[in-house]
Image (spheres, rainbow, N blue to C red):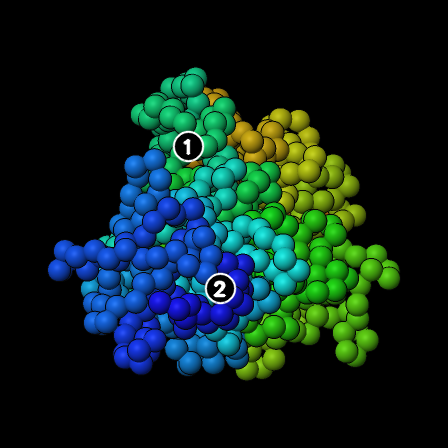
């Protein structure tokens, strides 16, 4: 038999640079030297001593000869071999292995239409094509791999199934820059990476950008997994979500970092008073090490968190849990904001099925789930997206746009349709495969402004000479338009810290398309206000009144987030002015004002404990505080505040309509008192809110009200059960026919120190001596 290949073809395969592997490897018809028709089977098997072809059904074997190259094997057959023959490999030292030939299976699996959509940036289910997918192809089980690396010279799948050998499973390139290969016998649970050979000859390993699961850090391999085996039980929740307007619902979000909410410690936490409900008791679990990493305390798993975190948050009365970034990230100290695996929930807390179970349980117990999502920048770790195929593939090529110096990260290139597609499909992926109820998009300002975090001369202006990143803004519009098209009823929340216009306006009127925006200006002004001595607040009254003058320009969410309790700022409680009693009173006043003010709500874990220390990502919350009465009382206060909020539509149903809010008096800076009305969709449904921001109580403080009747005291932040002084109005006050503040009636109230009153008209109560009709 004469050689059927040229030396150049063989060398290209040896160097992982052949443009069409399936034209050479596998089984092909040929003409023999005698001119007769025949078949040739070729395989390249580095490190293999000998190779035989096996016909499984016929139980026959035929040796292949080593030719062209020491590890290149070839055999000629006069009769056509079966479609999917096997190869018996002699590994040496008496070890053998039988595998199907991956190059005997059809390629490509990605269609021309798939490639067209991806090139245009509109393949919304890209995760069903790229990544690693267990499938059965022509009766043989295996895994189909596909990865985008257009500038790579060669790409191989390496893993636990091929001893991480980079020449055994070379991938087939396509015109769109996608490389693909079906590997028979590979299965869920196998670890893998892509070995990338660049045009410059460099060879390095990368995790799968669309991999669904990764090893526990510090290891970096992806893990084959099947996301379609979990049986969801939240169909009723999804149906209700799809058919309701979230902006007309109560939204009180508990923001949580799963890694520092509660740890499994060798020292059990002390017993807690029985009145503290929902507290997670870690003594039910024994500490066990996580493979490959041994922290001092073990993290709770997703399934354990379902047992502890969900009932705790539900008992507190929150409506949603917001999870700080769960996409795989190498460094705990990044809080999840420097991502390497956008499609892989972090394995710190378990496997993908565990996260699905957690979210499923949230829905079954009436809690929505918001995922913190990071499309603005990504980690520089070698196994991540940076310089993926030897070029700036996912990031901008010019470091003046492609690097974020403040965080030491890369910035996505929003001008590339494929990169936009990667990110939009990723957001859809979490909504589709994990049933999350929305995303909170991190650091939107860093995306919108080219000079964000950069000094003069370190950034490039746009085509019009401005500082706005036009393609990033267009990406966000495309993102939100697509999300709401597929998943009506979800939340898309922007953490946007500037005055960029129409962030939460629909895309069809030129907005960015989010339905909520964090009001960071409110947080800054109000925290500054409560940090100052009470006697000085009269000179800064604007801090608590000004946010209402711009409130209706956006759909705002009021936040006391993780960013407010880090970097030396201390906890919220520790920043309140005054002695310990006043600190708690100020915190109750702040939280009551937060819930009474128009806008949806987000608070960070630990606030409900009255935590003294600022958040420490390496530790856990100070649960032992709940042994102390002031902290128990504040814990109950948060429960009752959430209950008040959810029970009164006036406090949430018209957050973003001007008809939902009226000032009663915003000008009493001398006493640091404000009062206002919150109205529901029915104008007759309203509550009166009065806030006294000083420790000085006020008797006979008069405010105007719109109707006559008995105004019941629905909530008093100074109540004894919350640790307050218990000043109030003995359950409520009758209105008097004394016009005041432009209202036809008024109330003569006792205002408690550092207190907030919420009063509602009791329409069933009649004046004494007046019979009901």
Report whether residue 443 is seen.
no
- Quadrant where the N terminus sits is bottom left
Q: Quadrant of residue 229?
A: bottom left
- Where residue 245 appears, as percent x and y from the top left, is 41, 69
Frontmost residue, 740 versus 366: 366
In the displayed structure, 653 sits above or below 320; it is below
Q: Which mark is residue 251?
A: none
In the displayed structure, 129 sits above or below 226; it is below
- Mark 1 nearby-residue class (10 Å; few <14, some 14–19, many ≥20): few
Residue at point 63% right, 45% down? 563
- Give SS at disc 1: loop
- Mark 2 nearby-residue class (10 Å; few <14, some 14–19, many ≥20): some
Pick out the residue farthest to the right: 457
- Where residue 215 appears, as percent x and y from the top left, is 44, 42
- Where residue 226 appears, as percent x and y from the top left, is 31, 55
Frontmost residue, 465 versus 600: 465
What residue does disc 1 label? 291
Residue at point 61% right, 47% down? 381
Q: Quadrant of residue 764?
A: bottom left
Q: Earlier in the sequence, mark 2 or mark 1?
A: 2
Residue at point 74% right, 36% down? 533
- Give SS at disc 2: helix
Q: Is residue 222 left or right of residue 197?
A: left
What residue does disc 2 label? 10
In the displayed structure, 306 sits above or below 373; it is above
Residue at point 80% right, 63% down? 459
């Amino acid at each position: 038999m004469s050689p059927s290949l040229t030396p150049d073809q063989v060398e290209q395969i040896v160097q992982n640079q052949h443009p069409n592997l399936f034209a050479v490897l596998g089984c092909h018809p040929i003409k023999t030297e005698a001119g007769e028709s025949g078949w040739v089977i070729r395989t390249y098997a580095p490190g293999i001593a000998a190779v035989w072809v096996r016909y499984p059904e016929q139980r026959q074997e035929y040796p292949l000869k080593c030719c062209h190259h020491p590890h290149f094997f070839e055999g000629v057959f006069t009769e056509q071999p079966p479609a999917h023959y096997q190869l018996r490999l002699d590994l040496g030292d008496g070890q053998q292995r039988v595998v199907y030939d991956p190059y005997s299976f059809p390629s490509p699996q990605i269609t021309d239409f798939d490639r067209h959509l991806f090139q245009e940036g509109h393949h919304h289910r890209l995760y069903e094509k790229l990544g690693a997918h267990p499938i059965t192809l022509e009766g043989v089980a295996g895994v189909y791999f596909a990865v985008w690396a257009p500038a790579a010279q060669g790409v191989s799948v390496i893993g636990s199934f091929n001893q991480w050998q980079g020449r055994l499973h070379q991938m087939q390139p396509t015109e769109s820059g996608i490389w693909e290969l079906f590997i028979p016998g590979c299965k869920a649970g196998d670890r893998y990476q892509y070995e990338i050979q660049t045009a410059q000859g460099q060879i390095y390993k990368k995790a799968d950008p669309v991999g669904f699961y990764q090893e526990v850090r510090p290891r970096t391999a992806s893990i084959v997994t099947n996301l379609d085996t979990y049986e969801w039980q939240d169909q009723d929740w999804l149906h209700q979500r799809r058919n309701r307007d979230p902006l007309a619902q109560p939204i009180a979000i508990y923001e949580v970092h799963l890694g520092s909410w509660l740890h499994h410690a060798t020292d059990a936490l002390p017993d807690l008073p029985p009145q503290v409900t929902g507290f997670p008791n870690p003594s039910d679990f024994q500490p066990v090490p996580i493979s490959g990493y041994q922290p001092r305390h073990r993290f709770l798993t997703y399934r354990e968190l379902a047992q502890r975190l969900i009932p705790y948050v539900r008992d507190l009365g929150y409506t949603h849990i917001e999870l700080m970034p769960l996409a795989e990230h190498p460094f705990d100290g990044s809080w999840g904001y420097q991502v390497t695996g956008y499609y892989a929930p972090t394995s710190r807390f378990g496997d993908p099925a565990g996260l699905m179970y957690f979210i499923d349980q949230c829905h079954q117990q009436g809690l929505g789930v918001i995922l913190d999502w990071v499309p603005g920048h990504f980690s520089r770790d070698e196994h991540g997206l940076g310089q993926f195929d030897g070029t700036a593939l996912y990031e901008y090529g010019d470091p003046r746009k492609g690097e974020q110096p403040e965080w030491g990260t890369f910035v996505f290139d929003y001008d590339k349709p494929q990169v936009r597609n990667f990110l939009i499909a990723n957001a859809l992926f979490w909504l589709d495969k994990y049933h999350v109820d929305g995303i909170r998009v991190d650091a939107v300002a860093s995306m919108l402004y080219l000079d964000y975090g950069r000094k003069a001369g370190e950034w490039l202006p746009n085509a019009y000479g401005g500082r706005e990143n036009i393609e990033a803004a267009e990406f966000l519009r495309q993102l939100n338009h697509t999300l709401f098209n597929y998943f009506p009823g979800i939340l898309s929340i922007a953490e946007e810290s500037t005055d960029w216009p129409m962030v939460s306006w629909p895309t069809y009127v030129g907005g960015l398309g989010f339905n909520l925006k964090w009001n960071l200006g409110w947080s800054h002004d109000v925290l500054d206000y409560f940090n100052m001595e009470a006697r000085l607040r009269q000179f800064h009254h604007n801090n608590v009144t000004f946010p209402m003058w711009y409130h209706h320009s956006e759909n705002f969410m009021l936040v006391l987030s993780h960013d407010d309790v880090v970097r030396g700022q201390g906890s919220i409680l520790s920043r309140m002015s005054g002695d310990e009693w006043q600190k708690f009173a100020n915190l109750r006043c702040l939280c009551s004002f937060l819930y009474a003010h128009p806008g949806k709500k987000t608070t960070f874990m630990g606030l409900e404990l009255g935590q003294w220390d600022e958040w420490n990502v390496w530790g856990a919350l100070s649960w032992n505080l709940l042994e102390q009465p002031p902290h128990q009382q504040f814990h109950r206060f948060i429960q009752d505040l959430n209950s008040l909020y959810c029970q009164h539509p006036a406090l949430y149903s018209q957050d973003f309509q001007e008809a939902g809010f009226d000032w009663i008096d915003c000008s009493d800076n001398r006493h640091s008192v404000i009062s206002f009305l919150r109205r529901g969709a029915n104008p007759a449904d309203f509550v009166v809110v009065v806030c006294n921001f000083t420790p000085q109580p006020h008797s006979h403080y008069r405010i105007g009200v719109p109707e006559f009747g008995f105004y019941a005291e629905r909530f008093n932040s100074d109540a004894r059960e919350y640790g307050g002084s218990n000043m109030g109005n003995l359950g409520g006050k009758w209105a008097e026919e004394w016009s005041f503040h432009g209202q036809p009636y008024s109330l003569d109230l006792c205002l408690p120190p550092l207190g907030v009153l919420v009063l509602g008209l009791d329409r069933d109560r009649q004046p004494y001596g007046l019979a009901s009709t």
